[in-house]
Image (spheres, grey):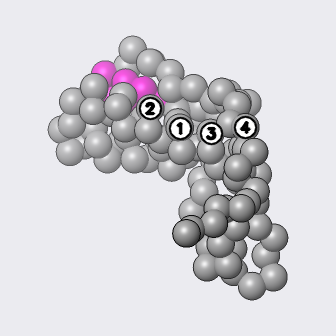
């Protein structure tokens, strides 16, 4: 039987790093995906402070350059918003880019 007590993984945390108990993690509705009305930047992912998430802006630009539909950018943007909300709730305090 697989035990999920605390969901702590020594493989993911590495040696000496504290684990995060994800069982009680509350993910707030921080940030948003904003429709800009701009043909060249139809959507912008912003954090809770209102600043654009740099890696998402670059990624959306690549999608636009590849000729992807605006709804594709929106769909990917919603997925990225969920991911960034999780990162922010888990304690990541980067400048907008997790990598």
Q: Which residue is mark 1?
A: 82
Q: Which residue is mark 4?
A: 26
- Is the residue under label 2 in contact with that under label 3 (CB below 8 Å)? no
> Residue 29's image quarter?
top right
Q: Which residue is mark 2?
A: 78
Helix, strand or loop at disc 3?
Answer: helix
| Residue 42 magenta-highlighted | yes
The circle drawn on residue 85 is 3
Q: Say if residue 71 shows up in the picture.
A: yes
Helix, strand or loop at disc 1?
Answer: helix
| Residue 27 magenta-highlighted | no
Q: Position of residue 67 (x, y in %)?
A: 18, 38
Q: Is residue 94 above or below residue 27?
A: below
Horizontally, is 60 left or right of 85 in the view? left
Which comes before the other along the chain, label 3 or label 4? 4
Which comes before the other along the chain, label 3 or label 2? 2
Which comes before the other along the chain, label 1 or label 4? 4
- Is the residue under label 1 in contact with that under label 3 (CB below 8 Å)? yes
Horizontally, is 72 left or right of 13 in the view? left
Instruction: Compute the Cα span from label 2 to label 4.
Output: 19 Å
Q: Main secondary structure of the magenta part?
A: loop
Query: Where is the N terminus found, in terms of image quarters?
Result: bottom right
For label 1, count other residues whose C-alpha is less than 10 Å away and answer few (under 14), some (14-19) or many (20+): some
Instruction: Compute the Cα span from label 2 to label 1.
Output: 6 Å
Which comes before the other along the chain, label 2 or label 4? 4
Q: Say if residue 95 shows up in the picture.
A: no
For label 2, count other residues whose C-alpha is less than 10 Å away and answer few (under 14), some (14-19) or many (20+): some
Instruction: Compute the Cα span from label 1 to label 4.
Output: 13 Å
> Residue 28's image quarter?
top right
Helix, strand or loop at disc 2?
Answer: helix
Magenta-colored span = 39-44
Task: Residue at 61%, 79% (x, y): give it.
Answer: 11
């Amino acid at each position: 039987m697989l035990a999920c007590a605390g969901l702590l993984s020594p493989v993911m945390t590495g040696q000496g790093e504290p684990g995060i108990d994800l069982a009680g993690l509350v993910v707030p509705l921080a940030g948003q995906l904003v429709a800009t009305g701009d043909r060249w930047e139809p959507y912008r992912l912003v954090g809770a402070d209102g600043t654009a998430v740099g890696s998402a802006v670059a990624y959306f630009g690549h999608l636009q350059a590849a000729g992807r539909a605006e709804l594709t950018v929106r769909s990917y943007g919603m997925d990225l918003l969920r991911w960034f909300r999780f990162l922010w709730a888990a304690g990541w305090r980067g400048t907008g880019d997790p990598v």
